[in-house]
């Protein structure tokens, strides 16, 4: 067909961002567990990884936290590719990307949405507590380390970094 645009079959599928729905809960718990277990072993011991992402989680607690704040879901071709959230004080509690979608701009898209939400809400800055694995991701997006922290988790201690970003 003359003049018709052909889609490049090798072009990456677009990332869409939408708000969390309660029926996303199990997908997010599974994604969280896979992301931690895939990335954390480069930086934490097996016991620390298990303490951070155990086999069983408090589903009710997860559901309450997701419902208590805007939680953003990134999708690629209708599949959940990642998620993030934004607390009322500008804190990003979670940013996780499905391992098979890493390196495709999912974290960038989610952080862009979170930052836009924060700006529209009049927030002057963002904070997060980034793991050793997530620290470089946040740094690439303008966050700076405020302090290193030791966080107790189920009998283990995990290192993370309080990071901040000022919003103009």
Image (cartoon, rainbow, N blue to C red):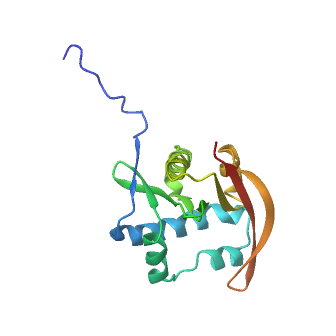
Q: Residue furthest top?
A: 2
Q: Nearer the viewer, residue 54 or 66?
A: 66
Q: Quadrant of residue 60?
A: bottom left
Question: Measured from the top left, where is residue 108 in percent x and y?
Answer: 55, 45
On screen, residue 69 versus residue 21, left or right, reads right
Question: Measured from the top left, where is residue 106 in percent x and y?
Answer: 51, 48
Question: Measured from the top left, where is residue 71 in percent x and y?
Answer: 46, 62
Q: Quadrant of residue 67?
A: bottom left
Task: Identify the residue at horizontal 48%, vertical 56% (top origin).
Answer: 82
Q: Nearer the viewer, residue 20 or 14?
A: 20
Task: Identify the residue at horizontal 68%, vertical 66% (top origin).
Answer: 41
Tell me the quarter of the image containing the C terminus. Answer: top right
Task: Identify the residue at horizontal 55%, vertical 60% (top origin).
Answer: 96
Q: Considering only vertical position in the picture, is 138 above or below 50?
A: above
Task: Identify the residue at horizontal 51%, vertical 83% (top origin).
Answer: 56
Q: Considering only vertical position in the picture, is 156 above or below 123?
A: below
């Amino acid at each position: 067909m003359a003049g018709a645009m052909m889609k490049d079959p090798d072009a990456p599928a677009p990332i869409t961002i939408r708000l969390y729905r309660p029926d996303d809960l199990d997908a997010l718990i599974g994604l969280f567990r896979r992301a931690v277990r895939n990335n954390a072993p480069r930086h934490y011991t097996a016991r620390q990884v298990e303490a951070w992402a155990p086999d069983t989680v408090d589903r009710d607690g997860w559901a309450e936290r997701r419902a208590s704040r805007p939680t953003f879901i990134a999708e690629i071709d209708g599949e959940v590719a990642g998620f993030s959230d934004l607390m009322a004080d500008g804190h990003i509690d979670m940013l996780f990307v499905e391992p098979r979608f890493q390196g495709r701009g999912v974290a960038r898209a989610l952080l862009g949405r979170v930052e836009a939400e924060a700006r529209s809400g009049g927030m002057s800055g963002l904070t997060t507590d980034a793991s050793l694995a997530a620290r470089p991701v946040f740094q690439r997006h303008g966050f700076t380390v405020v302090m290193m922290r030791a966080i107790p988790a189920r009998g283990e201690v995990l290192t993370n970094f309080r990071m901040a970003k000022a919003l103009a």
